[in-house]
Image (tube, rainbow, N blue to C red):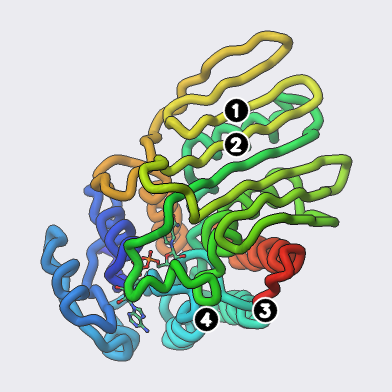
Amino acid sequence: MKTRVAVIGAGFMGKTHATSYLKGCLEAEIAFVVDSNLSRAESLAASLKPAARGLADIQTVLDDPSVDVIDICLPTGFHHELCLRALQAGKNVLCEKPIANSLAEADEMVAAGNASGKCFMVAHVLRFWPEYVEAARMVNEGGIGKLRRISCQRLSTPPAWSAGNWLLDSRLSGGAVRDLAIHDFDIINQLAGMPVKVSAAGNPMDFSACMTLRNDVTATVEASYSMPKGFPFRMAFMIVGETGSIEFDGSGGSLSIVKKGVRETVAVSGSRTFNQNESAEERDGYFYEIAYFLDCVRSGKRPELGRSQDARDALAIAIGIEKALGEGLA
Ligand SMILES: NC(=O)c1ccc[n+]([C@@H]2O[C@H](COP(=O)([O-])OP(=O)(O)OC[C@H]3O[C@@H](n4cnc5c(N)ncnc54)[C@H](O)[C@@H]3O)[C@@H](O)[C@H]2O)c1
């Protein structure tokens, strides 16, 4: 039997998630698309194959026992309340990142997820993004020796697509620190643990940060939602160990590796370049993320990727950097 999903939020991520569930082999169906803007909900619902039902009322969906999954693709300020309501209603929950806007809210969500016996996962998609997955595998297998430094870049023009432009308001979205670089904070935590010291320069929409981690590892993150018009979205990283390095220049499909004094390009399958206008038909990080989530839902196992505690920790790094910028929001 197909897993029945309600996607809440019919914006950029709602569309990305909905189309990912419907890729043939995943055995899921979108029962409902819900959005406070009914015409957005109906329009996304009608565009799906097979079409879903568009609604403006979330409670109808929470009360429907045939719905297995609530997938939260709402602006961040709404994650906490809906996540608690959905878990309370006995639903499995996939929630977009950032988990919430404050650590107090995040802690409540982690606790509710743990107590629920349901699958609660936060959509930190880089844990499923082929180039990041391959790099983490190499690091964990000791392929570049003891880790020394990680540098990450995530650079974007202003996110002009969001409903009512909530993403452009750093008080609502957290800007480039909380909304964008949180992806990189999660990866740094995955590879090297939580920072013990952070410093930062810039503002919430455009910043550079330095982190000291345990075991003499350092990390830098540059992120911007203020790149000039025409600048192509760029996500990139360099991971340096004592005996080698791994570089991803953002163009997709390959990594540049230095190992034992030799530089080579390694192809990474299952990847594509990131482009907001591209259709989400191919297998990409979102596909693998949703495939993994559905597997956890069906098998009853707790997610080890996209753990709510890790999402909470990524938010804690973001809040530390906001404080270093003098912009503490929580
Ligand atoms: N993982 C990623 O790569 C990625 C990329 C972009 C956004 N996101 C995250 O996804 C979430 C959604 O972002 P987006 O870009 O899709 O935003 P968006 O503005 O494009 O879409 C949000 C939708 O939610 C609807 N909405 C707003 N408040 C609502 C409410 N109270 N009840 C019902 N519907 C409501 C809006 O009408 C809109 O259609 C955010 O948390 C964002 O950080 C993740």
Kind of residue at disc 3 = Ala
Mark 4 Cα shell of 10 Å, populated few (<14), some (14-19), many (≥20): many
Cα distance in 3D space between marks 1 and 2:
6 Å
Residue 222 in the figure: left or right of residue 326: left
Which comes before the other along the chain, label 1 or label 4?
A: 4
Q: Which label number is shown at residue 237? A: 2
Residue found 32% across the figure and 72% down from its top = 163
**Residue wearing tag 3:** 330
Cα distance in 3D space between marks 3 and 1:
34 Å
Closer to us: 173 or 131: 173
- State the quadrant of the N terminus: bottom left
Kind of residue at disc 1 = Glu
Which comes before the other along the chain, label 3 or label 4?
A: 4
Residue found 39% across the figure and 34% down from its top = 270
Q: Where in the figure is residue 53, as x and y percent of width and height?
A: 16, 76
User: Disc 3 vs disc 1: which is toward the camera?
Assistant: 3
Q: Which label number is shown at residue 247? A: 1
Q: Where in the figure is residue 122, as x and y percent of width and height?
A: 52, 64
Closer to us: 187 or 234: 234
Q: Where in the figure is residue 92, as x and y percent of width and height?
A: 43, 73
Residue 67 in the figure: left or right of residue 231: left
Residue found 52% across the figure and 16% down from its top = 265
Report helix, strand or loop for mark 1: strand
Cα distance in 3D space between marks 3 and 2:
28 Å
